[in-house]
Image (tube, rainbow, N blue to C red):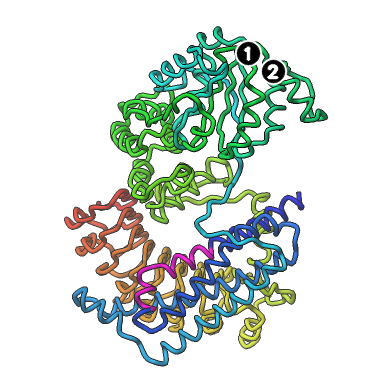
């Protein structure tokens, strides 16, 4: 168990690192960073950082399988992780500066905004940022140079990683499950029945791109009653990439002779047995999934197969015309895509339960028809996407696949896997998160699930065993701290401060912070006794925080220094029943995506500049304020108004919430009516109003 957990944990470390490297590369390639780099004179430094990051990213592909049992390699990956985190912080600051300028330039034309954005902040700022980019690049260069110690192989970032070999095929097929290919089947069956004037054995190649159904067609032909009666011997051999003559001869003999063991036979013995077995017999031999383009190898095998009776056939399936031209002496049978009708039939069969009344899902059927058409007649794509949507009845899931950007790119022969992996790339982070939660719920990963607000807010627990396993995985990055703790990991990224052993003197707490990694990214205060001064000390030391949880805290105001947390994405003040106001500096959190003010019953009002939080996506609030302006919150997806006793009329400026998808209003006893402006919420998908007596 512990070994399995250790191996899984090391793999998890790599995957987190891989995701971090992906984020860094994605940001470096973004239009905003390229524009800022050009305008502020750091373009070349950013390009160098991108090149170095790409080279290291390529090395990670090979490191994945080698780190589990190599302690030094894991340490090396840990250094890489820290360096990529620091690189991401630097890029974040470029993005923050661009966002700040966008906010300050509001009201101007796009031309003026672009001009203002391009205007350098100061020569000193440019020099500082250029120096920091250069320094992190040199650090990554130095780490990358150590890869030679581990014999890591560089792969280009766009080189596909073989996750697993294709499963070995077999000859069985249930004909009732196959849709289409009737004409192609009849054509090939006819060819198999023909005799040959030139050679006893004829080779018929079936050619087509991946996923078109070459193997399925070969199975249909192989099991056709006419074919079964026509040939005295039939053999099915799966070939794939490795075209080894000795191995293929052994496979053919095993299929023909059953349980005999040929592992100790020499090639001389094998060829003799094979020719004797085929001599004078009319046989059908299927070579499925052939990739070999070495004509010499084929000729060596072919000469051992020529002793069959006249009319013997070899049927070959391959993706490559060059393979067909090397092996075939019959015209290649080039497989085309299925008809739209057949594709839709396959899609419906895979996406819905047998016997399910499709009339209840007419909208889904329409979208499904569009998805099936986009699959360009490739049955594997149709079947895979249909299966992916099986049991999913949320229209958003179907639309996400239909509108995926992958359809706009040119698919190669191996594009099906990329298509499936890219599904949902247009989905919002909320959609993706909801998908993950639903999947974990369906697997009983969570327990004691409680619906707090129907369809909006849930509460659940993680099973103790799952929690222990998660803690094992996260032991080098996550830590629960008490102020008596002496042994603190150097590389922790996420910390919780426990509610025990809080020091009597605040200077002791501040001195304790010096023991911690200054690049900490998440802080969760489990104690209600945290003081404002200690919180301020945390903000001054840990400026790279992404997540800050201050639930059930007991202070009346936040320190102004919270506005310096440029990287902050998540802030929760839930159930702080004494806080009265938020500092105006909080409106400088341009990266903030989630703000939870639920249960802040004494909060008098939100700052006037809250509209400056242009990346805010989720807002849950309780306040004494009567009205509030949501102007400029164009990214807001989820708005929850809870226990707001002075709330009487839904806001007039709802038209500004152009991305709002979910609006929940609960326990607002004085809410009288909804404003007519609610009709301006054209993206709204969920509207929940509960426990509002006057509505």
Identify the residue under disc 2.
256
Tell me which residue sits at (41%, 54%) in the image: 430
Residue 529 image-quadrant placement: bottom right
Q: Is residue 331 visible?
A: yes
Judge whether 417 appears above or below 65 on screen: above
Q: Position of residue 151 (x, y in %)?
A: 70, 63
Is 31 one of the magenta-colored residues? yes
Residue 611 image-quadrant placement: bottom left
Would you call the spot at circle 2 few (<14 residues within 10 Å), some (14-19), or many (20 or more)?
A: some
Judge whether 49 appears above or below 646 on screen: below
Q: Position of residue 262 (x, y in %)?
A: 78, 26
Secondary structure mainly formed by the magenta segment: helix
Q: Position of residue 491 (x, y in %)?
A: 65, 72
Tell me which residue sits at (65%, 31%) in the image: 300
Instruction: Between residue 594 and residue 78, name the one nearer to us.
Output: 78
Instruction: Between residue 7 and residue 636, name the one nearer to us.
Output: 7
Q: Position of residue 37 (x, y in %)?
A: 39, 78
| Labelled disc at residue 233 | 1
* Residue extending furthest toward the left: 676
Instruction: Between residue 603 and residue 511, name the one nearer to us.
Output: 511
* Residue extending furthest toward the right: 264
Q: Is residue 495 visible?
A: no
Judge whether 421 appears above or below 275 on screen: below
* Residue extending furthest toward the front: 198
535 horizontally vs 268: left or right: left
Magenta segment range? 20-37
Instruction: Between residue 260 and residue 408, name the one nearer to us.
Output: 260
Judge whether 396 appears above or below 158 on screen: above
Q: Are marks 2 and 1 in contact (CB under 8 Å)?
A: yes
| Labelled disc at residue 153 | none
541 horizontally vs 266: left or right: left
């Amino acid at each position: 168990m512990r070994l399995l957990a250790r191996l899984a944990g090391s793999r998890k470390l790599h995957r987190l690192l891989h995701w971090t490297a992906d984020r860094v590369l994605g940001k470096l390639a973004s239009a905003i960073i390229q524009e800022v780099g050009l305008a502020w004179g750091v373009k070349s430094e950013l390009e160098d950082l991108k090149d170095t990051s790409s080279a290291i990213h390529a090395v990670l592909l090979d490191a994945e399988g080698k780190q589990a049992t190599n302690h030094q390699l894991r340490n090396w990956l840990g250094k890489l992780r820290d360096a990529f985190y620091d690189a991401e912080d630097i890029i974040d600051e470029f993005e923050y500066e661009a966002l700040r300028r966008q906010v300050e330039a509001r009201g101007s034309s796009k031309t003026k905004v672009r001009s203002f954005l391009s205007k350098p902040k100061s020569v000193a700022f440019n020099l500082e940022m250029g120096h920091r980019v250069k320094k992190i690049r040199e650090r990554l260069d130095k780490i990358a140079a150590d890869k030679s110690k581990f014999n890591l192989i560089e792969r280009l970032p766009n080189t596909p990683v073989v996750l697993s070999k294709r499963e070995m095929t077999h000859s069985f097929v249930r004909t009732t499950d196959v849709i289409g290919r009737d004409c192609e089947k009849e054509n090939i069956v006819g060819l198999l029945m023909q005799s040959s004037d030139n050679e006893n054995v004829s080779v018929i190649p079936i050619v087509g791109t991946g996923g078109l159904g070459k193997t399925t067609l070969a199975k249909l032909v192989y099991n056709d009653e006419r074919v079964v009666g026509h040939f005295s011997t039939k053999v099915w051999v799966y070939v794939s990439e490795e075209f080894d003559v000795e191995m293929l001869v052994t496979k053919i003999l095993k299929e023909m002779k059953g349980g005999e063991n040929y592992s100790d036979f020499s090639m001389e013995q094998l060829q003799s047995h094979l020719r004797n077995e085929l001599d004078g017999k009319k046989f059908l031999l299927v070579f499925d999934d052939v990739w070999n383009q070495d004509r010499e190898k084929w000729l060596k095998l072919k000469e051992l197969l020529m002793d069959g009776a006249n009319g013997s056939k070899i049927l070959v399936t391959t993706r490559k015309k060059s393979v067909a031209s090397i092996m075939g002496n019959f015209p290649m049978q080039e497989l085309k895509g299925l008809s739209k009708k057949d594709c839709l039939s396959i899609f419906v069969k895979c996406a819905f339960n047998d016997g399910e009344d499709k009339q209840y899902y007419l909208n889904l059927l329409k979208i499904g028809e569009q998805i099936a058409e986009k699959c360009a007649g490739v049955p594997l794509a149709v079947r895979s996407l249909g299966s992916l949507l099986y049991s999913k009845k949320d229209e958003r899931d179907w639309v996400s696949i239909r509108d995926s950007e992958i359809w706009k790119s040119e698919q190669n022969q191996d594009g099906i896997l990329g298509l499936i992996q890219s599904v949902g790339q247009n989905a919002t982070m909320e959609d993706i998160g909801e998908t993950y939660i639903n999947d974990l719920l369906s697997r009983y990963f969570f327990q004691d699930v409680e619906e707090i607000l129907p369809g909006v807010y849930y509460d659940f627990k993680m099973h103790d065993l799952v929690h222990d396993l998660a803690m094992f995985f996260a032991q080098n990055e996550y830590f629960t701290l008490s102020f008596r703790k002496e042994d603190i990991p150097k590389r922790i990224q996420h910390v919780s401060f426990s509610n025990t052993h809080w020091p009597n003197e605040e200077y002791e707490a501040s001195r304790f912070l010096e023991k911690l990694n200054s690049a900490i990214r998440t802080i969760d205060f489990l104690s209600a006794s945290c003081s404002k001064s200690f919180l301020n000390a945390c903000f001054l030391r840990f400026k790279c925080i992404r997540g800050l949880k201050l639930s059930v805290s007991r202070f009346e105001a936040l320190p102004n220094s919270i506005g310096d947390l440029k990287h902050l994405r998540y802030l929760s003040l839930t159930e702080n029943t004494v806080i009265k106001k938020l500092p105006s500096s909080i409106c400088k959190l341009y990266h903030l995506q989630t703000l939870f003010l639920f249960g802040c019953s004494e909060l008098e009002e939100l700052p006037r500049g809250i509209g400056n939080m242009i990346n805010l996506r989720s807002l849950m609030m309780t306040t004494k304020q009567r009205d509030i302006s949501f102007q400029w919150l164009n990214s807001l997806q989820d708005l929850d108004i809870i226990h707001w006793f002075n709330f009487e009329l839904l806001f007039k400026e709802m038209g500004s919430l152009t991305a709002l998808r979910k609006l929940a209003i609960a326990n607002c006893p004085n809410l009288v009516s909804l404003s007519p402006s609610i009709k301006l919420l054209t993206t709204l998908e969920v509207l929940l109003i509960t426990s509002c007596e006057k509505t």
